[in-house]
Image (cartoon, coloured by chain):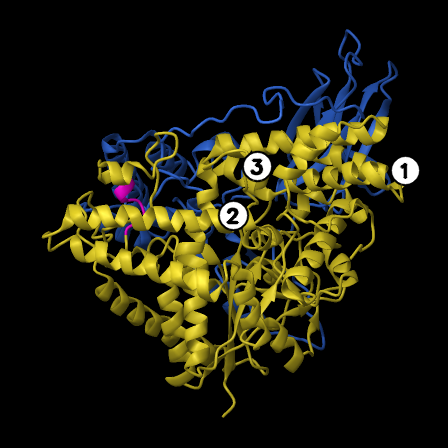
Amino acid sequence: MEPKGYFALVLHAHLPFVRHPEHARFLEEDWFFEALTETYLPLLDVFEGLVRDGVHFRTTLSLTPPLLSMMTDPLLQQRYLNYLDERLEALAGEQRRTAGDANYHPVVLFYTEFFTRLRKRFVEQDRMDVSQSFRRLMESGHLEIITCGATHGYFPLLAVNEESIYAQLSMAVRTHERILGRKPRGIWLPECGYKPGVDRILKEFGIEFFILDSHGLLNAEPRPRYGVHRPIRTPGGPAAFARDYESSKQVWSAEEGYPGDHLYREFYRDAGFDVHQPHIEKLRHAGIATFTGLKYHRITGKTTWKEPYHPGWARDRAAEHAGHFLFNRQQQVQWLTSFLDRPPVILAPYDAELFGHWWFEGPQWIDFLLRKMAYDQSDVKAITPAEYIDWFGDLQPASPPECSWGAGGYHEVWLNGANDWIYPYLHAAAERMSALVHRFPDALGIQRWALDQAARELLLAQSSDWAFIMKTGTSVEYAVRRQKTHIHRFDRLATMAESGGYDEGYLREVAARDSPFPDMDYRIFQTRPWV
Amino acid sequence: MKTETIETLRALAKKLGLSGYSKLRKEELLKLIANQERKAGAKSATKSQKAAVRTGTKQKKPRRTSAKSASATPSKSSPVANATPARQTAAETEQQVESAKYAFALPGAKEPTYAADLGEDIDRLPVIREPLLCLLPQKPGVLHGYWVLPAASLDANRSVRLRLATYAGDHLAILGEHPVPSERGHWYFHVEEGIELGAVYLQLGRYRPDGEFVSIIQRGVARIPNLYASTRTDRRWWVSDAQFRAMYRRAGGLERGRQLGWPGSASSPGGPLVWPGNISSQR
């Protein structure tokens, strides 16, 4: 039986490129290790389990080029193994500490089993490179992997220099193809940041669809016949899908959202702050108490008193929440099909790291949701945006307005009193880089090396994460430092190329640190695809 | 908060454990809730939590002035933030969750500092050599302009000015003007809704004694982001007004009279963009 409508789950997985070989341990590298532990590996477990059990499912995942670069980096792979081993060692200490404690010992055993299992799969199954496990799921047709900007540069504010948009896309498409073996059919625009004209550039790269926040479609010109429930055909050619607000709200909303349930794991209580014993203090960075990932409490309620975490209860709750979510999607599809003449799609995009890292039970919720969707009903079927346009390609032409999915719906998160100082530097650097491309169209040898590294530094400086962190106030010092460091390095390398005076020692040092995109070609900074 | 319906405010009052709220008028209810939040705020331990309350209760204040205090606070378990969910939009929650990716410790913890790596002078950025003038849209109603001029290029009387202009028929209409006191700077222009703003230009120049403006650098074109749903429907893809409105509302949009708009615009600074009263939203 044909379903009444379709459901497209889209997960946006991204972290900025953080890799510091100049330090033996580096706090901010933990962002990636935490996301691997709580989100990427558990998601792989979920998807592989679904494949093994023969469950029909489709999910779309954006793996951004910085994330793919970190997943395939041997230094970070080795450091992640150390991260797991450090935790297993600390957990041995925790087992001794909590022996005989009926409340906390079971939670410690749960984590011991959790980290042991992850370590085993990371070494034996993923062979330390999780990108290839995602690739296998893509090749079997279950996952649609889409790309993003090369360093998650925020297009609407970089578009002053069109070369920057081409560079972000050229390097993204190259990296996607190099690591995953295919050209991407779709893109997650960084922060869903869209500016009219970007659609035309995407078309030049063969990109067939992208995703906007709801108002990107709702306020399109002319009125979209199907609201956010079918994509539109943009003037440049690619299809634009939009986020469904209702399904987003059920997961995100502080009021009705699932992740705040009292049985779920509490994010902010962590053994790193609660336990003052040498085996836990060993996990500290430069003596600072930080998250260890060993979180023993459930949310409990609006109190500072927290009860011990009970994985079984939380799992049951995740199943209930998945059922609730699915029921609401069925209702929604029934309402939509009462007046729409084509099958609607409900597209629900989320930050992948919401599932697992913030909402620990999130991957289980996805597991239950996809299983229930396959077996418990026939109103809604899982689909990817690519499949949708293959099957129902007759799309209404309309032009979306400039927009993003950030707070406020436009560019304020990335352009405000906390971060507006960065734009003169970014724009001046982009102008300088494209002038260098014109001046040296066929650089060779050390000149080529300097220009390639300059292009890397500029891409890293364009990462929207630094502006975002400056605005939201978590790890600001690090973000400011990274932003300024890349501006400095770009300036020095560009000066070398302009003057012809090269410092090989410096080049070697910088290249060892800022190492993403081994296939870099500085000519990406021009107004045509360079892939 | 003022845009919430009386039912939402009552539910919030109930959640906050208040009593005697059911007979209050909207203004009284707002006051009561604000008082309760202030009390809760005073009890909260960290500065950032207080900042979240402040930001939330003064929604009409231009956001950029409170940029550093916005929603980085954990609300998952914090009693203060949990008590005030109605204020937090889905986008703000998302922003908070996204920033949790970069959390390394509890809010307020001191970040480690690292020594300069390859001799970069972090406190002093390289000099920008080419003159720059740029106009960027920030959100509906607000445009950001910045300029960078060569060192010591401004004359002593500082007569250089920055103008935001648009073509209105056959003449140039000035939307905003600002002195240029130094070689580097930026300005947020607040532009009114309602003018047909296809494109706006930013000019940097000076007035001649006869009143004529001589532009030294001119930059455009910034388009004002779209606030409202289109009123045009396509013949082939015709949609009835009622159906479109129903979908728009369910998708989190707002309506006032015949206009449909996005809530992201409802609290924008710049006055006219805030829809007074009668905002209905199916939340």
- Seen in the picture, residue A5 relative to A133 is either above or below; the reply is below
The local secondary structure at tag 3 comes to loop
What residue type is disc 1 on?
A: Arg
Give the magenta range.
A266-272
Q: Which chain is blue?
A: B
What residue type is disc 3 on?
A: Gly
Rendering coords of residue B156 (x, y %) = 77, 6
Q: Tell me the quarter of the image containing the N terminus of chain B.
A: top left
The CA span between labels 2 and 1 is: 37 Å
The local secondary structure at tag 1 comes to helix
Which quadrant would residue B207 be assigned to in this image?
A: top right
Residue A143 located within the stretch drawn in magenta:
no
- Seen in the picture, residue A473 relative to A85 is either above or below; the reply is above
Q: Which residue is labeled 3 in the image?
A: B270
Q: Residue at x 67, y 31 (%)?
A: A487
Rendering coords of residue B202 (x, y %) = 76, 33
Q: Which residue is labeled 1 in the image?
A: A439
Which quadrant would residue A25 be assigned to in this image?
A: top left
Q: Report whether mark 3 lies on the same chain as mark 2.
A: no
What residue type is disc 2 on?
A: Leu
Left/right of residue B53 with respect to residue A402 in the rendered view: left
Q: Which residue is labeled 2 in the image?
A: A76
